Image (tube, helix red, strand yellow):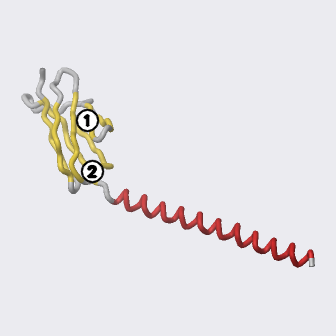
Amino acid sequence: MKTIFVLITAALLSVSVYAKDNKNEKDVKGTAAIETVQKVNVVGITGSIIDNKSKELLAGAAIFINGNKYYSDLDGNFAISDIKPGKHKVRVELISYQPSEMEIDVRKDQKLSIGLVQE
């Protein structure tokens, strides 16, 4: 009788552990699917920062979007690929230039040209 009780208890414990493992596996797959959908729902912004007067490209300008900071490269260009569609406040700063601030409404990949005025 003890042997049967031990076998039944062991079988129930095994089924219980297996069920918990499967549940965790499903949770991980569901999370991965949500992350994939969220990554698909982003757009990119590319562009250049220029001097309004001389039309020269400006390297090293700081571009702020949604609390994140990006920089224009040595050619004055920038590329940001992880922006959610919608309205965003963009601020651009560079030493010896007046900061520029604008609101953009991004629905698909967009190219911007942002002009700065020297102080």
Local SS, label 1? strand
| Image: 78 above or below 108 | above
Q: How many marks?
A: 2
* Amino acid type, mark 2: Gly
Query: Which residue is at a point 76% across and 69% down the rendered structure image?
Result: 13
Q: Quadrant of residue 80?
A: top left
Comes first in the chain, label 1 or label 2: 2
* Amino acid type, mark 1: Ile
Q: Nearer the viewer, residue 88 or 69?
A: 88
Looking at the picture, how far across and down is residue 5, in whole percent?
A: 86, 75
* Residue at the spot of label 2: 44
Q: Quadrant of the N terminus?
A: bottom right
29 vs 77, left or right, is right
Check if mark 1's residue and mark 2's residue have beta carbons within 8 Å: no
Looking at the picture, how far across and down is residue 99, in whole percent?
A: 18, 28
Local SS, label 2? strand
Q: Quadrant of the C terminus?
A: top left
* Residue at the spot of label 1: 63
Query: Which residue is at a point 33% across and 49% down the rendered structure image?
Result: 82
Q: Residues within 10 Å of mark 2 (few under 14, many from 20)?
A: some
Query: Which residue is at a point 31% across and 55% down the rendered structure image?
Result: 42
Looking at the picture, how far across and down is residue 103, in whole percent?
A: 17, 42
Q: Residues within 10 Å of mark 1 (few under 14, many from 20)?
A: many
